[in-house]
Amino acid sequence: MPPIPIKPGIYKIHAHIIGSTSLVTATEYAVKHGAPVITDRLNPLPIEQEWLIEPTEPVPGAPYVIRLAHHEQAGLVVAEDKLYVNAVPRGELAKFTFERVIGGVKILSDKGLALRSGHRGAQITLVEPKPEFQETWTLEFMSPVHEE
C-alpha cells in the first residue's frame, strides 16, 4: 500500500490488539537506549501519552518524526528493533510512514518494519509487516501542532 499523509498535530496512538483504551506510552525509566515505549491503559497525565507527529521536511511524501508533545526534545528512536523515547538531535529521531489498513493505520519505519504491540505493557517492537491486528493503530487527533 502507498503511504498516506497525516495531518501534523498532537495525537494519542491507540493499539488495537488490546482495545481502544491502550495507548502508546513513554515509560518513566530509561535503560540503555532511552525509555522503553509500551502500550498501556489510559493515563490521566497526557505528558507520556500525547505525541506530536510532524513531517521531517515540508514536502509532500516526506516521512514523519514522532515526539512527546509535552517534551520537545524527546522523540521516538529505534534500537535493536525496539521502540524507545530519548532526547536526541532531531536528525537522529526514527522516521515513519503510515499506510491505511483495515481498521486503522500501519506505522512503518524507514527500514519498512511495522510497529507491533504484542500485549498491554509489552515494549513495542518493529517487525516485518504482516496482516496482523497487533500491527494496526488508530491515530486520535487531539490538537494542531502549536496548540495545547
Image: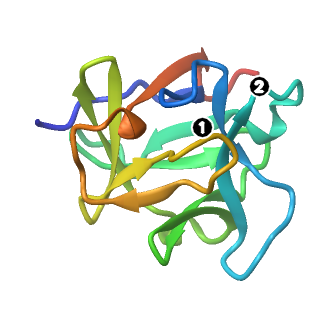
| Residue matched to label 1 | 52
Q: Within 10 angstroms of label 2, few (less than 14), some, or many (20 or more) residues? A: some
Q: What residue type is labelled 2?
A: Leu
| Residue matched to label 2 | 42
- Display coloring: rainbow
Q: Which amino acid does label 1 sit on?
A: Leu
Q: Residue at x 63, y 37 (%)?
A: 51
Q: Position of residue 147 (x, y in %)?
A: 71, 21
Left or right of 61: which side holds 71?
A: right
Q: Which residue is drawn at 58% across and 18% down?
A: 20
Res 84 → quadrant = bottom right
Secondary structure at badge 2 equals: loop
Q: Position of residue 118 (x, y in %)?
A: 51, 47
Q: Within 10 angstroms of label 1, few (less than 14), some, or many (20 or more) residues? A: many
Q: Position of residue 13 (x, y in %)?
A: 56, 30
Query: Quadrant of the image for the C terminus?
Result: top right
- Is residue 90 positioned above or below 122 on the image? below
Query: Quadrant of the image for the N terminus?
Result: top left
- Whole-angstrom CA distance, mark 2 to mark 1, is 17 Å
Instruction: State the residue in front, 132 or 103.
Output: 132
